[in-house]
Image (tube, rainbow, N blue to C red):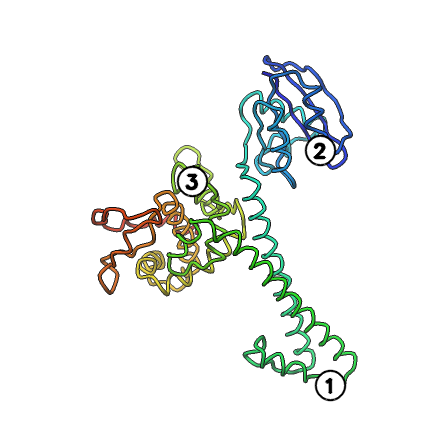
Amino acid sequence: MYYVGLDIHQRSTSVEILDCNGKLVKRAEWKLPWPQLAQQLRQQAPAPFAVCFEASCGYGYLYEQFSSVAQQVKAAHPGSLRLIYKSKRKNNRVDAGKLARLLYLDAVPSVYVPGKETRLWRQTIEFRQSLLIRLVALKNQIRASLRERGIAAPSGLWTVKGMSWFKTQGENDDAWALRRDLLIEELAELKKKIKRVELQLRKMSDPRPGTALLKTIPGIGPRTAEALVAYIDNANRFSSVRKAGSYFGWDPCQDASADKNRLGQLTRNGPPTVRKLLCEAAWQSVRRSPTVKAFYDRVTRNDPDRKKIAIVATAHYLTRVAVSMLKSGEVWREDPRLANSPEPDVAHQTLGGSAPKPPPRKPLPPVDGSREQQH
């Protein structure tokens, strides 16, 4: 087996090839567009060979191209390549050599590469999020324009009635009226774009049974459910629900040595869009679900200063629940000890059919206080 390290850029690619003993076979610089890299590898690299490259924009496309010619392909996580980014000497040739050596040592911090449809789904979710950021910024501009003139905005400013009121402001000031009209037009255009994106998201998520499954969790809406399903993709790739929480960045940073164990802030690995949606959904779940409310209360300990800690811990809890549900296929069910009414029979059904009623749940375990504080 030969090991190929690629440091890929838009117009050039640095290549280093090692043999089965880790000795240098070839080093080159290819000035080729991406569609020609796979064919160049087939011609220049001795077979059989494995490929390692750094995951960045377009990593899914490159992974598919290299998979057609290589025995093994690994996309390295950029945030975990300390061997490269902590180096005092860094250039394209050195980076390609280090990627080849990591591949030879089987020490590549690889990332999960989903299929093409899932990647497109994720990109659409992120595009909607970027439109929402622009929408919030635009609304802030409208509120700022009113404050500049000392005008108090009504509580329902974004309703039809509120926008009709906004159109009547500043009629005697042509410059301000022009700014007002352009802001209103941009706001209407952004809302239309978001509706188009959400319509496309609905077409992409409706055929997925996992989306309907997660929407049975109180407080989880279609946007949160589809984001979870898109980024989890295959729930069985997580050997435990704790690893799923780590994938989404809910676990704290750890610095342990001898008998000392320091836990810091959240790692915040993984997609920030999912964490944002889950934190918003957690507030709704606390209001609607007795089971989630009981978990939230255990973390808060009747301390108002722990509300933010508790809501992040609740979002982490919902992530673990979502992965468990996707693995088992069971819909959400409340803890019968906390529900106000007997648990309905439908709570024990799955999307694929009926399932036997599970045994009574064990008592809720105590929450680890030292870990809670980091959430």
Number of other residues with Cα within 10 Å of mark 1, as a class: few under 14, some 14 to 19, many 20 or more: few
Q: Quarter of the image holding residue 144? A: bottom right
**Circles 2, 1 touching at the beta carbon (< 8 Å):** no
Disc 2 to disc 1, how far (Cα)?
57 Å
The residue drawn where x is 52% and y is 47% is: 268
Disc 2 to disc 3, how far (Cα)?
35 Å
Q: Which residue is mark 1?
A: 171
Number of other residues with Cα within 10 Å of mark 2, as a class: few under 14, some 14 to 19, many 20 or more: few
The residue drawn where x is 52% and y is 45% is: 270
Between 317 and 219, the one lying in front of the other is 219
Mark number for residue 35?
2
- Image position, residue 348 (x, y; %): 27, 52
Q: Nearer the viewer, mark 2 or mark 1?
A: 2
Q: Which residue is mark 3?
A: 243
**Is 154 above or below relative to 102?**
below
Q: Quarter of the image holding residue 179? A: bottom right
Number of other residues with Cα within 10 Å of mark 3, as a class: few under 14, some 14 to 19, many 20 or more: some
**Circles 1, 3 touching at the beta carbon (< 8 Å):** no
- Image position, residue 259 (x, y; %): 39, 35
Say what amino acid the circle numbered 2 marks.
Pro
**Is 209 above or below relative to 176?**
above
N-terminal label among 2 and 1: 2
Say what amino acid the circle numbered 3 marks.
Lys
Say what amino acid the circle numbered 1 marks.
Glu
- Image position, residue 265 (x, y; %): 49, 48
The residue drawn where x is 39% and y is 64% is: 304
Q: Secondary structure at mark 1?
A: loop
**Circles 2, 3 touching at the beta carbon (< 8 Å):** no
Q: Secondary structure at mark 2?
A: helix
User: In this image, 53 relative to 375: left or right?
Assistant: right
Mark number for residue 69?
none
The residue drawn where x is 72% and y is 76% is: 181
